[in-house]
Image (spheres, rainbow, N blue to C red):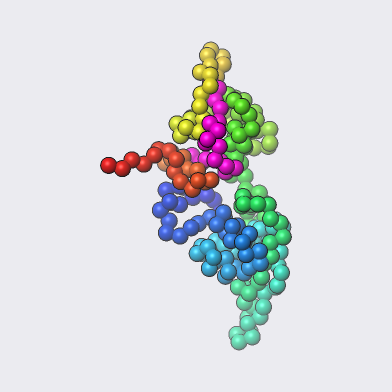
Amino acid sequence: MARQPVHLVADAKRPQGRDVIWGAIRKLRRCTVQDLEHATRIDEQTIRSYVQGLKAAGYLTVAEPVKKDHRHGVLNSSSEVLALVRDIGVEAPRVTRAGKPVTQGAGTESMWRAMRMVQSFSTRELVTLASSGGASVTLYTAKRYVSHLHKARYLRMVDRGGPGCGARYALVPARNTGPRPPQVQRIHHVWDANEGRVVWPLETHA
C-alpha cells in the first residue's frame, strides 16, 4: 500500500490509506472486512490486502473463522471476525501483505525523528543521526528534505555556516506538529499528515 501523492489524496472523494483502516480497527476492536468497508468507505480489496499484512505481522488474529454459506455450499470469506491483539497506538503499522515492515519512507521518518530530538543540526549531522537507526539516508536526500522544510517554515537557520562548515538548522517548536513526518511530494508540495493539509506552498485566493 504505497502512499499516494498529496494531490491525489486531497482530490479523492473517499478517504484512502492504511491510517483510515487502522483507525477503524482500533475503534471497533473486533470486526469483519465488511465492517471495515462500511466504516471507512475504502474498497474491499485494499482493506483485505492490509488486513492480510496485519494478520501476518501479529497485529490481528482470527477470533471467529470463516463460516460456510449453507445456501450455496461455499465459504463466506466476509464472515471472518478479526480481533485486534497488538495495539501500538494511533500510528498505523506499515507492513507488506506478507507482514514485513515497509522500508519506503523510513529515511524521512528517521530524519523527522532526529529533528525533533536535537536542538540544532547540519545536514551532515542529520544523515548520521537518521542512519543510526538503520535507515538509508544520503546527503542529497537530507539536503532536499531540509530545504523544503525550511521553505515551509518548519525549520529556522540558526547559523549560516562558512567554508568547510555547513549551515545549522533547528525545528521551530510551533511546527513540531506530531510524530508523522512532513512529506515532500512529487509535485514539490509539503504535506503534513498530522494536520491533514498542504502546508507549502500556501494557497492564495483572489
Q: Position of residue 178 (x, y in %)?
A: 57, 42
Q: Nearer the viewer, residue 58 or 160?
A: 160
Name, please, the residue furthest toward the top.
Answer: 163
Q: Position of residue 57 (x, y in %)?
A: 70, 56
Write the residue at 50% across / 57% down.
16
Figure quadrant of the N terminus = bottom right
Q: Is residue 183 magenta?
A: yes
Q: Is residue 136 above or below residue 76?
A: above
Figure quadrant of the C terminus = top left
43 vs 93, left or right, is left
30 vs 205, left or right, is right
What span is colored magenta in the figure? 167-186
66 vs 153, left or right, is right
Write the residue at 43% across / 51% down.
10
Q: Nearer the viewer, residue 24 or 134?
A: 24
Q: Nearer the viewer, residue 32 or 203?
A: 203
Name, please, the residue furthest toward the left.
Answer: 206
Q: Position of residue 170 (x, y in %)?
A: 56, 27
Write the residue at 47% across / 32% down.
153
Write the residue at 65% across / 72% down.
80
Q: Position of residue 46 (x, y in %)?
A: 55, 61
